[in-house]
Image (spheres, rainbow, N blue to C red):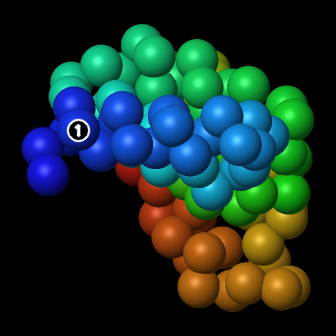
Amino acid sequence: MNPSERLQYLEELLQNDPHDPFLNYAIALEYLQMDNAEDAVELLECLRNESPTYIPTYYQLGSIYVEQGDADKARPIIEAGMALTKDPDPKTYLELRALLEELD
């Protein structure tokens, strides 16, 4: 299945549960696979607002901003993710910290 077909499939699934964080996240990743960072960022920002405890959003969104060279947007997102993960998920915390170190 190519990215376009996966995107269509995920969007069909999303119709049954439009607020499913995993499906929205998966769609954002498909946008990235299709070199569409703009739509990915838009969806990840919405996901961060609607499901602020969905941890994968922080790493992915932060890494997009790092890649774009936008430290002002990346830093607070990465730091917010680190605050959410320090105790319950130390592995993700370390991944976010490594991403933050790329900014410094």
Q: Is residue 61 visible?
A: no
For this orientation, the residue located farthest to the top is 38
Q: Dot 1 surroundings within 10 Å: few (below 14), some, or many (20 or more)?
A: few
The quarter holding residue 91 reads bottom right
Mark 1 = which residue?
5
Q: Position of residue 19 (x, y in %)?
A: 79, 40
What residue is drawn where x is 51% and y is 37%?
A: 12
Note whether 70 is above or below 34 in the view shown.
above
Question: Does residue 36 appear to the left or right of 61 in the view shown?
Answer: left
- Spot the residue most to the left: 2
Which quadrant holds residue 37?
A: top left
* Residue shown at 63% from the left, 56% from the top: 22
Q: Nearer the viewer, residue 19 or 60?
A: 19
Image point 76% across, 57% down: which residue?
Answer: 54
Pinpoint residue 7: horizontal percent, then vertical percent. Answer: 35, 36
When the figure is inspected, residue 55 is found, relative to residue 11, above or below; the finding is below
x%, y% of residue 27? 46, 39
Q: Is residue 13 left or right of residue 83?
A: left
Q: Is residue 87 visible?
A: yes
Q: What amino acid is at disc 1?
A: Glu
Instruction: State left or right for residue 64 relative to residue 35.
Output: right
Q: Is residue 49 above or below residue 14?
A: above
Residue located at (42% from left, 13% from top): 38
Q: Taking 93 as reference, is 64 left or right?
A: left
Number of labels in the image equals 1
